[in-house]
Image (cartoon, rainbow, N blue to C red):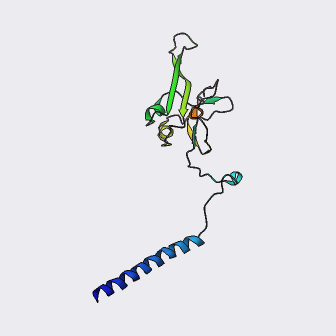
Amino acid sequence: MKSIYTYIKSVLNGIKSLLTGMSVTIREFFTKKVTEQYPENRATLYVPERYRGVLVMPHDENNEHACTACGICEMNCPNGTIKVLSKMIEPEEPGGKPKKVLDKHLYDLGMCTFCNLCVISCPSNAIIFENSFEHSLYTREKLKQQLNKEGSKLREKKKPQA
């Protein structure tokens, strides 16, 4: 008699479990879908503002950037994705100190973990993450980029007017 009772109880538990699962399935069937039909809808595709796609160094219309070549972004990068190469230039006026300027700001997208530590730690806000996401390539070498443009220079700080 006890085995029949446990058998019926287990069948009823199975039916309850099945109905619970089916109710979740039916509820999801009627909710609004969020699937994007990519690449057909490239023109209307919504990419969230906070999405981290690729690291860039913004330049203004005069081909000037804000990077002072301090190397903090390179130090904070957990896996060596960023390399900041700088050079020393002699001052124009006599008796001035040599100045360190950015030569190359190298970035390897293939190694990047998109942790955002480089952007957060940059004291001059010289680098940012753009929300572009199409990075499929056939070779890893094309994922290595130079962030500063050819012939770019450090943006001069505006002096406060007296």
Image height of 108 relative to 6, above or below: above
Rendered image quadrant of residue 64: top right
Image height of 111 relative to 38, above or below: above
Name the residue at 57% across, 40% down: 54
Q: Quadrant of the N terminus?
A: bottom left
Rendered image quadrant of residue 62: top right
Give percent across and percent down for residue 20.
46, 76
Image height of 94 relative to 107, above or below: above
Name the residue at 50% across, 29% down: 83
Give percent across and percent down for residue 159.
59, 28
Q: How many marks?
A: 0
Image height of 60 relative to 100, above or below: below
Is 100 or 11 nearer to us in this picture?
Answer: 11
Residue 162 in sight in this render? no
Name the residue at 44% across, 32% down: 75
Give percent across and percent down for residue 148.
60, 29
**Residue at the bottom extreme, as displayed:** 1
Q: Quadrant of the C terminus?
A: top right
Is 99 or 79 nearer to us in this picture?
Answer: 79
Is 69 or 149 nearer to us in this picture?
Answer: 149
**In screen coordinates, is 75 left or right of 161?**
left
